[in-house]
Amino acid sequence: MADTRLVCVRRVPHPIEANLLRGLLEAADLPVALIGEGLAGAYAGAPRFADVKIMVPAWAKSSAEAVLADYDHRCAAQSQEEWRCGSCGEHNDAGFEICWQCGHAPDDNKKKGDAWRSA
């Protein structure tokens, strides 16, 4: 008989983040459930006491943890890099996915062959 227990692979404070991570796991063909999603939204502004639990079947735990670790790694790398727009030359904080000045994406700059990352 297959193990159908659900195990928690992550706790997050916000339903939006929980749904983003659920989408990543589902894109990797992993079944996922959120526990406490409704409770977190019900207590906006109050001290946080209800995290949203991201649950997967026990058999999918290692795969789910790998997906989440990859996401964490990409977020950490992205958050440490400021970038310069190859289109207009504007410096952008790492949190910007497109240039706040002209709207071009960093990938647009890569395609042009520009050096778009700065230290």
Image: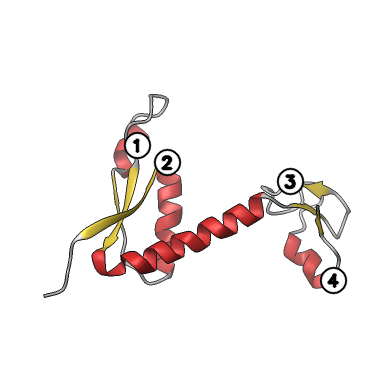
The residue carrying pointer 2 sits among few (fewer than 14), some (14 to 19) or many (20 or more) residues within 10 Å by Cα, namely some
Q: Which residue is mark 2?
A: 14
Residue 118 position in % (x across, y down): 82, 54
Q: Closest to the observer: 60 or 92?
A: 60
- Looking at the image, residue 79 sits to the left or right of residue 42; the answer is right
Q: Is residue 70 above or below residue 20?
A: below
* Mark 4 or mark 1, earlier in chain: 1
Mark 4 or mark 3: name the one nearer the start of the chain: 3
Tag 4: amino acid: Gly
Q: CA distance from mark 2 to mark 4?
A: 38 Å
- The residue to which callout 3 is attached is 93
- Residue 67 position, x and y percent, is 45, 65
Q: Residue at x 30, y 40 (%)?
A: 38
Q: Residue at x 58, y 59 (%)?
A: 74
Q: Mark 1 to mark 3: distance in Å?
A: 30 Å
> Sequence-wise, which precedes: disc 2 or disc 3?
2
Give the amino acid type for the residue marked by disc 3 in the picture: Asp
Nearest the eye: 10 or 33: 10
Q: Residue at x 38, y 64 (%)?
A: 64
Disc 1 designates what residue?
A: 40
Separation (CA) of disc 4 from disc 1:
45 Å
